[in-house]
Amino acid sequence: MRCYLAGFIQGSKITECVAWRKQVRDYYKVRDWPIIFLDPLNGKEVNTISADGLTSHISPHAIIHRDFKCVIDCDLVVVNMNTFGEERPLTGTICELAWAWEHHKPIIMITDDPKYLRHPFLSYFASMNFKSVEEMLEAKAIPYFFKGTVNADY
């Protein structure tokens, strides 16, 4: 199973942007789940993301084409709507949600923000909602989709 980890990316908050994705990957790695995590922050170019998150040494076209391919190729999207206190909108993440919805990908949304929880589009797009990464991990949301689509276990 392939799982895409979508969410906020900004150079000034890169530690936070990487940390939640690493937390999810490490959780399943320790438990030896055969899940391939597609992660837009997996690579050395993460160090070239500008403080405002709008530029890096990778061209915008390359970023969008890679991320689109990841969404299309994945079986599940986990999206963290947290901006870590920043005001910049989640424009790229919202695009990824639309791509996922258009291609019938299940979406696990992580947010405690009422503006996302109550928004008709986002609340409809999400197959499951959780207030934190920890809550999602405890609920075994990813294994629910894994067992139902990859490996039935009776």
Image (cartoon, grey):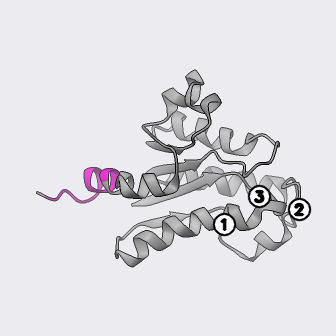
Q: Which residues are magenta?
A: 144-153
Residue at 46%, 67% (x, y): give it. Answer: 36
User: The residue tagged with tag 2: helix, strand or loop?
Assistant: loop
Indicate which label's residue lies in the foreground, 3 or 2: 2
**116 shown above or below 74:** above
- Disc 1 marks which residue? 18
Image location of residue 44, percent across then percent down: 75, 77
Residue at 51%, 45% (x, y): give it. Answer: 131
- Disc 3 marks which residue? 62
Q: Is residue 111 left or right of residue 145?
A: right
Crowding at label 3, few (<14), some or many (≥20) Cα neighbours within 10 Å? few
Residues tagged 3 and 2 counted as in contact (Cβ below 8 A)? no
User: The residue tagged with tag 3: helix, strand or loop?
Assistant: helix
Q: Is residue 54 left or right of residue 116?
A: right
Picture mark count = 3
Q: Earlier in the sequence, mark 2 or mark 1?
A: 1
Residue at 48%, 36% (x, y): give it. Answer: 126
The dominant secondary structure in magenta is helix
- Disc 2 marks which residue? 50
Separation (CA) of disc 3 from disc 1? 20 Å
Looking at numbered disc 2 in the image, what kind of residue is underneath it? Ser
Report if residue 145 lies within the magenta region.
yes
Looking at numbered disc 1 in the image, what kind of residue is underneath it? Val
Image location of residue 69, percent across then percent down: 60, 54
Residue at 34%, 55% (x, y): give it. Answer: 140
Quarter occupied by residue 90: top right
Q: Earlier in the sequence, mark 3 or mark 2?
A: 2
Image location of residue 115, percent across then percent down: 64, 29
Q: Residue furthest left?
A: 154
Indicate which label's residue lies in the foreground, 3 or 1: 1
User: The residue tagged with tag 1: helix, strand or loop?
Assistant: helix
Q: Quadrant of the C terminus?
A: bottom left
